[in-house]
Image (cartoon, grey):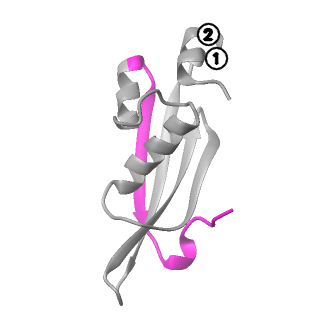
């Protein structure tokens, strides 16, 4: 996989969009929130973080950004992926509250 820097330098392969879809399940019995996420780059799934990962709010977004950086799609994991907007990349995200069975599967 090429890094964002390499892709951005090659105008024929410029990244146009990044989309992160999060799912959150709230365990009412224990009062904990869990998340899973999928990440697309230019309409192609490049990362799935499955299972039950502990966290709430936008933690799925932070962790997805970190993983994308580790894969070379993002240059600095200390900033959210939304910093790509400054480089002309469209960045979208959403999070849905779901039942436990609807969380992304761990592969």
In front here: 17 or 32? Answer: 32
Task: Please name the residue shown 41% across and 30% down the image.
Answer: 76
Residue position for label 1:
13
- Tell me if residue 91 is in the magenta stretch: yes
> Residue 26's x, y, as percent?
37, 76
Q: Secondary structure at mark 1?
A: helix
**How far is the residue under mark 1 from the one under mark 2?**
6 Å
Label 2 secondary element: loop
**CB atoms at circles 1 and 2 under 8 Å apart?**
yes
Q: Which residues are magenta?
A: 87-107
For the C terminus, the image quarter is bottom right
> Which residue corresponds to the image point at 35% horizontal and 20% vertical from the top-left?
86
Please state if 40 lies on the left or on the right of 90 as rendered: right
Q: Is residue 17 above or below residue 46?
A: above
Image quarter (top left, top right, bottom left or bottom right) of the N terminus: top right
Q: Residues within 10 Å of mark 2 (few under 14, many from 20)?
A: few
Quarter of image, res 4: top right
Q: Which residue is mark 2?
A: 10
């Amino acid at each position: 996989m090429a890094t964002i820097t390499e892709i951005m330098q090659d105008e024929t392969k410029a990244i146009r969009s990044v989309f992160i879809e999060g799912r959150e399940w709230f365990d009412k019995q224990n009062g904990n929130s869990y998340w899973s996420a999928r990440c697309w780059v230019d309409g192609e799934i490049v990362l799935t973080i499955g299972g039950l990962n502990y966290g709430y709010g936008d933690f799925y977004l932070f962790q997805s950004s970190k993983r994308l950086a580790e894969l070379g799609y993002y240059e600095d994991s200390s900033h959210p992926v939304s910093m790509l907007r400054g480089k002309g990349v469209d960045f979208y995200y959403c999070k849905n509250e779901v039942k436990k069975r609807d969380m992304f599967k761990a592969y």
